[in-house]
């Protein structure tokens, strides 16, 4: 194979990777696992909003992520905020197995879930 052909193939591969990234294909969010019992989910939410350092102000009453007003949605927002803020420092989306990674954007209505590379 000639070096010119190899260069063309390399450029095509790089171009494909760039298109995939700009298309959001590699974005991921951290959300509550629906199978987690409420007690465990509440403890993980309390930790995320407390010692964990998540910004939970948007899940307070009259804020964009308050509705739906349920434990799973509030925990999902808090888990994702924590994960996005601290994953570059080694944080995981674990929360004592109360959370999981998804590649489907959980944002809804005026509630936007952040994602950071």
Image: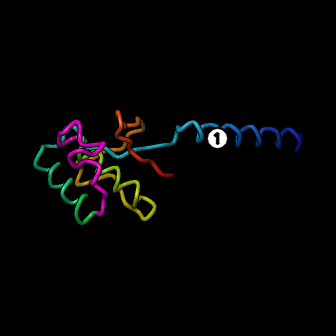
Image quarter of the N terminus: top right
Which residue is painted at 60% across and 37% down in the image?
A: 20
Image location of residue 53, percent across then percent down: 30, 63
In the figure, residue 17 lies in which quadrant?
Answer: top right
Camera-side residue: 117 or 109?
Answer: 109
Name the residue carrying label 1: 17
Which residue is painted at 43% across and 44% down in the image?
A: 28
Camera-side residue: 56 or 91?
Answer: 56
Horizontally, is 103 left or right of 80 in the view? right
- Toward the left, the furthest residue is 39
Residue 60 inside the magenta-drawn segment: yes
Horizontally, is 69 left or right of 64 in the view? left
Q: Main secondary structure of the magenta part?
A: loop
- The number of numbered badges drawn on the structure is 1
Camera-side residue: 37 or 74?
Answer: 74
Image location of residue 84, percent across then percent down: 40, 54
Image location of residue 16, percent across then percent down: 67, 37
Give the colour scheme of this rendering: rainbow
Camera-side residue: 5 or 92?
Answer: 92
Task: Magenta stretch: give its range.
Answer: 53-72
Instruction: Classify mark 1: residues with Cα within 10 Å, few (<14), some (14-19) or many (20+).
Output: few
Which residue is painted at 58% across and 41% down in the image?
A: 21
Which residue is painted at 17% across and 48% down in the image?
A: 41
Image location of residue 14, percent across then percent down: 70, 43
In the figure, residue 71 lies in which quadrant?
Answer: top left
Circle 1: element type: helix
- Toward the front, the furthest residue is 62
Residue 68 inside the magenta-drawn segment: yes
Horizontally, is 86 left or right of 9 in the view? left
Horizontally, is 100 left or right of 4 in the view? left
């Amino acid at each position: 194979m000639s070096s010119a052909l190899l260069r063309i193939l390399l450029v095509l591969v790089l171009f494909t990777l760039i298109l995939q990234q700009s298309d959001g294909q590699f974005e991921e969010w951290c959300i509550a696992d629906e199978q987690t019992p409420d007690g465990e989910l509440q403890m993980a939410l309390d930790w995320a909003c407390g010692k964990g350092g998540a910004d939970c102000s948007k899940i307070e009453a009259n804020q964009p992520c308050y509705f739906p007003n349920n434990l799973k949605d509030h925990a999902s927002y808090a888990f994702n905020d924590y994960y996005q803020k601290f994953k570059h420092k080694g944080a995981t989306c674990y929360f004592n197995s109360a959370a999981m990674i998804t590649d489907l954007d959980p944002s809804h209505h005026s509630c936007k879930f952040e994602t950071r590379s």
